[in-house]
Structure formats: structure tokens, C-alpha cells
């Protein structure tokens, strides 16, 4: 199975890559900027015995096409699953940065996937931030455009990015909406947290404003990897049965759009 991953060295991405690489016969192609070679090298060391299953692909999501024409030709028809995790998470970022990376970057990824051919599937890492900054109540996996306020650059561009995937992807896709994710402890002793929104998740699979569920970082990556197989169409309800509710309990949502 061949995978292509953006954001592989990021907060959740490196845990996802670790689990994908451990799959039998896996080849994991990592989109990486040439200036970030050391991050790719560190990722290879992280996956240890499976490091030879990682392959760097030099490019950038802010570049139309992601990679040069020669590299795109090599990948065409050979990728089974594309995981798009690359994004800017900075509550102080300006609009231009958010637009360039989160919105246009996602559009570039979708265009890239649409040109891959074969039976490729797209997995988009969205966020429960699409619910907006002041939404009150449950925001379920069946909800998207509810007239919510997305004035902040992060909320707005995560919403726009998911909208691009929903409307412009020509291949089967899935959308994942993490709530709050907790990683390893900092040197000061506190947990590293990624809390992109006031909304989290309850056991029923819906975001609840003001009640975030803290999912462990390694579990977050494992959840996305676990939801990856899609040999036959399934409904969201059947996903919850198959996964035993674990992804929802960790603040994840899986939207089965044409998968």
C-alpha cells in the first residue's frame, strides 16, 4: 500500500506516519521542503526499523501542483491514500498566512490528488474549529455550513479548507475533525496541547461547546490510520460500530463522504 502524507513532521503527522510505516508492504511518501531535510531525517530515525519505508518528495503545499512535473509523473497512478495534515495552527497568525497555507494549500493538495489517477482516496485533517469561535451546542459530523461565525483566520480557513475538499475533490474522501489533542510533556512539566477550538466531543459523536475531550497524541495518529482502510462503502454509523466509538471518545470525527 502506498501513502502520500503532507504535514508528516507535525504535531499529529509524525505519529500517523509511524503507524502507516509499520503496515506490511507500506511505502510512505513524505512531502517535505528541501530546507526541512533534517526534519525528514529525524522522522526516519523515529520510525526506526521501518525507516526504509519512508521516501522524501520535495515540494510545498503552497506551490501549485505541490511538486515538479517530473515527480508528479512518477507518482501518478501509484498512490492509494493521501493524508493531508499540513496546516498553520497559530491563533495569532495574519489572514494572508492563513489563506496561503490553510486555504490555498488545501486547494493545491486537492488539485494534486485529482490528477493522481488510479483508486486514490483523500483524507483531510480538518478541525472542529469549523464550528466557529462562538457556536453554542452540539456540532455533529453531519453539520457543516450552519451560518456559524468564522471571523478568526484559523476558524475561517479551516472552514474554507474543508469546503474545498467537499466541493472540489473528484476522488473519494474523508474528513477528520480533531478536538483537543494532548502530546508529550514539555520540559516544564506541563502537557503539550493543541486546542484549536472551544468545542470538543462527547461520547455520542458530537462537538459540545466548552467541553473539549483531550485525546492523546499517539492515539490521535493511530485513530486516523485505523480509519484509513475503506475496501467497501460504509456509513458513519457503521464506522462507529467498527471502531467501537474510540475515535469519537478521543475527539475525532470521521465523515464518510463518498468513501
Image: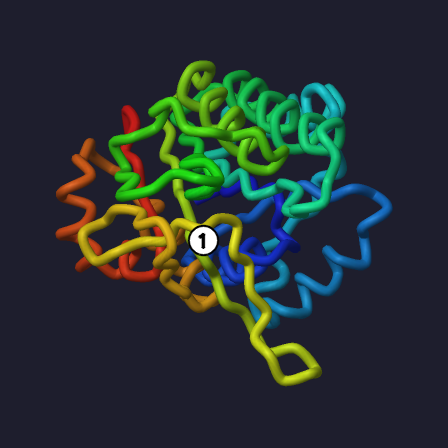
Q: Position of residue 174 (x, y in %)?
A: 36, 34
Q: Secondary structure at mark 1?
A: loop
229 relative to 159 in the view: left or right: left
Residue 54 % position (x, y) = 62, 53
Locate residue 252 relative to residue 39 in the image: left or right. left
**Can residue 236 be spotted in the picture?**
yes
Residue density around tag 1, few if under 14, some if 14–19, many if 20 or more, within 10 Å? few
Q: Residue 258, percent across and down?
A: 28, 24
Residue at left offset 63%, top offset 84%: 189
Q: Nearer the viewer, residue 53 or 141?
A: 141
Image location (x, y in percent) of residue 194 = 55, 58
Q: Does residue 126 appear anywhere in the picture?
A: no
Using the rendered view, name the quadrant where residue 245 is placed: bottom left
Relative placement, left or right, of 237 versus 63 is left
Residue, x 75% and y 61% (percent of image)?
Answer: 41
Pointer 1 residue: 25
Give the answer, above or below, for where 168 lies relative to 196.
above
Most foreground residue, 221 or 92? 92
State which quarter of the image contains the N terminus.
top left
State the residue at coordinates (41%, 36%).
131
Image quadrant for the C terminus?
Answer: top left
Which quarter of the picture shows residue 10? Answer: bottom right
State how many labels appear: 1
Nearer to us in this view, 20 or 25: 20
Vertical comparison of 128 with 164: above or below = below
Amino acid at each position: 500500500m502506498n501513502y502520500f502524507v503532507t504535514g508528516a513532521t507535525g504535531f499529529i503527522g509524525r505519529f500517523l506516519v509511524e503507524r502507516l510505516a509499520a503496515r506490511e508492504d507500506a511505502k510512505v511518501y513524505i512531502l517535505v521542503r528541501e530546507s526541512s531535510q533534517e526534519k525528514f531525517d529525524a522522522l526516519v530515525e523515529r520510525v526506526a526499523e521501518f525507516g526504509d519505508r519512508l521516501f522524501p518528495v520535495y515540494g510545498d503545499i503552497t506551490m501549485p501542483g505541490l511538486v515538479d512535473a517530473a515527480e508528479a509523473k512518477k507518482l501518478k497512478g501509484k498512490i492509494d491514500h493521501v493524508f493531508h495534515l499540513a496546516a498553520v495552527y497559530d491563533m495569532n497568525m495574519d489572514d494572508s498566512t492563513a489563506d496561503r497555507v490553510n486555504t490555498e494549500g488545501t486547494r493545491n493538495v486537492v488539485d494534486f490528488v485529482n490528477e493522481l489517477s488510479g483508486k486514490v482516496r483523500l483524507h483531510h485533517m480538518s478541525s472542529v474549529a469549523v464550528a466557529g469561535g462562538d457556536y453554542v451546542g452540539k456540532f455533529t459530523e453531519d453539520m457543516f455550513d450552519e451560518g456559524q461565525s468564522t471571523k478568526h483566520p484559523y476558524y475561517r480557513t479551516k472552514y474554507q479548507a474543508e469546503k474545498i475538499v467537499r466541493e472540489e475533490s473528484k476522488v473519494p474522501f474523508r474528513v477528520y475533525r480533531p478536538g483537543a489533542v494532548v502530546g508529550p510533556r514539555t520540559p516544564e512539566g506541563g502537557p503539550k496541547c493543541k486546542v484549536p477550538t472551544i468545542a470538543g466531543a462527547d461520547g455520542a459523536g458530537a462537538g459540545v461547546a466548552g467541553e473539549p475531550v483531550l485525546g492523546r497524541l499517539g492515539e490521535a495518529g493511530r485513530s486516523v490510520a485505523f480509519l484509513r482502510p475503506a475496501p467497501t462503502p460504509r456509513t458513519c454509523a457503521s464506522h462507529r460500530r467498527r471502531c467501537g466509538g474510540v475515535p469519537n471518545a478521543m475527539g475525532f470525527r470521521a465523515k464518510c463522504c463518498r468513501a
